[in-house]
Image (cartoon, grey):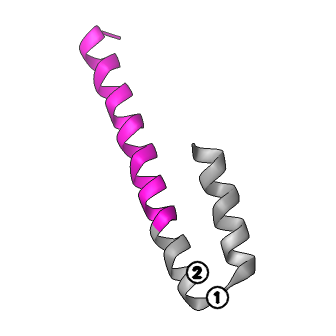
Amino acid sequence: MSQYRLQNASKAQENHRINIQKSLEHRLQVAKAKGDDRLISQLEAEIKYFS
C-alpha cells in the first residue's frame, strides 16, 4: 500500500477507537444515572480494554 493509504487507514482506525470510547463513556453516564451496577462494571471493563 502507498504511504497515503497507510496514513488514511491509521487515521480511520484512530477515529473509530475514539468514537467507540465516546460511545462507551456516554453509555456509562447513562448507566450511572440509572444505577445499573452490572452495566457500569461491564462498561468500565470495555473502556479499560479500549484504552
Above-or-below relation of 50 to 43: above
Badge 1 vs badge 2, beta-carbon distance below 8 Å = yes
Does dot 2 land on a helix, a strand or a loop? helix
Measured in 3D between alpha carbons, the distance from the residue under mark 1 to the one under mark 2, in whole angstroms, is 5 Å
Return the residue at label 2. Answer: 32
Question: Residue at horizontal 66%, vertical 46%?
Answer: 49
**Type of the residue with mark 1:** Gly
Residue 7 included in the magenta stretch of the image? yes
Residue 50 included in the magenta stretch of the image? no
Relative to 3, 25 lies left or right: right
**What label does residue 35 carry, if any?**
1
**Type of the residue with mark 2:** Lys
Q: Judge by depth and name the residue closer to the eye, 28 or 9.
A: 28
Above-or-below relation of 12 to 16: above
Does dot 1 land on a helix, a strand or a loop? loop
Q: Judge by depth and name the residue closer to the eye, 41 or 14.
A: 41
Rendered location of residue 45, percent (x, y): 70, 57
Quadrant where the image shows the N terminus? top left
Quadrant where the image shows the C terminus? top right
| Stretch of the chain drawn in magenta | 1-25
